[in-house]
Amino acid sequence: MQTLTDRFGRVHDYLRISVTDRCNLRCLYCMPEEGVEFAPSSDLLSYDAIVEVVETAAKLGITKLRITGGEPLVRPNLSSLIARLSAIDGIQDISLTTNGVLLAQQAQALRDAGVNRVNISLDTLDPTRFKFIARRGDLKRVMDGIEAAARVGFSPIKLNCVLLKGVNEDEILSFLRMSVEQPLHVRFIEYMPIGHADEGWRQHYLPLSRVLEIAEEAGFAVSPKSDMKGNGPSEDYLIEGGAGSFGLIHPISDHFCTNCNRLRLTSDGGLKPCLYWIDELNVKPALGDPEAMHALFMRALDLKPLNHEMAAKLANQELSHEPTARRMSQIGG
């Protein structure tokens, strides 16, 4: 089997697939308050097209998939796509990132179709603050989704908490305690300038060194954890006596590009080598032509840079390349 190895020697076995740019929330770090212009439904890749792309990707060494959005659970009949993807020879693991609002109703069908693991966005444990960050929605529905995920057997269950200075940093200790009291993996994520790099982003950016400082101040005995199942760049830790664990994803203060093993497929057919840079290739002209699709993946690898430069953007330094104008919801979280 051919492997997807880029010019820096990084082997790619992981494809993140966005199935929609639509979302039932409007989180302040993901969309502007007025929202974004969603792609017409006719522009979205059909399930047949997604399956075709993954069939080629699997022959090239992709073994792991993550389904994302927008909010993937707003796409109708998602479990039918999952079942088709899980049947593709070579695909060994399918995970899902969701805001959790619709998860309670769909958890069992997703599990039966072949989803192994879920990442659930949870930026606050306070119902009022939830409405401030998400600009709509109900925290209870997310918590119900977490309970449903555990009930149907997703493992591990990871909670993604984007830390925002002056907004939810005072909840770090509560989330750490959550990882002690429950068999959940809480992942703190730095706020990234995807599609924007305004003063609001700089104002709310918080380096994740603060999490370890708070753990130390609380008297927690923290040790590294190296056996967390998943494909991501999280730096993982255990708190002594804890039922779960916590992780740090710090693309800005300590980027992880040297170990990047992923490509991204946007809901409208863009194959992206890197989350941050503007480069993407349209897969639609290659549909129905396996050789052309194969060549497209190889071209994406050729375009992949050694690293992104989000830290340079934080420091207002000149970038070597043009960053994407798409917001996170339009790329795939």
Image (tube, rainbow, N blue to C red):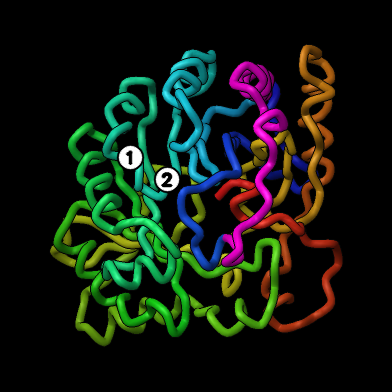
Q: CA distance from mark 2 to mark 1?
A: 8 Å
| Residue 161 in magenta stretch | no
122 on left or right of 196: left
Residue at 36% across / 31% down in the picture?
Answer: 116
Q: Is the residue under label 1 in contact with that under label 2 (CB below 8 Å)?
A: yes
User: Which of 321/124 is in front?
Assistant: 124
Q: Which residues are magenta?
A: 31-60
Q: Which mark is residue 103?
A: 1
Above or below, comparing residue 199 to residue 80 in the picture: below
Above or below, comparing residue 257 to residue 191 in the picture: above
Graded by Cα atoms within 10 Å as few (under 14), some (14 to 19) or many (20 or more), the crowding at tag 1 reads: many
Q: Amino acid at mark 2?
A: Thr
Find residue 54 and report its image quarter.
top right
Residue at 17% across / 61% down in the picture?
Answer: 242
Above or below, comparing residue 257 to residue 217 in the picture: above
Q: Secondary structure at mark 2?
A: strand
x and y percent of residue 226 in the render?
A: 37, 53
113 on left or right of 78: left
- The quarter of the rendered structure image containing the N terminus is top right
Q: Is residue 1 visible?
A: no
Instruction: Please give the residue where the numbered disc 2 appears in the rendered image.
Output: 98
235 on left or right of 139: right
x and y percent of residue 59 in the render?
A: 65, 18
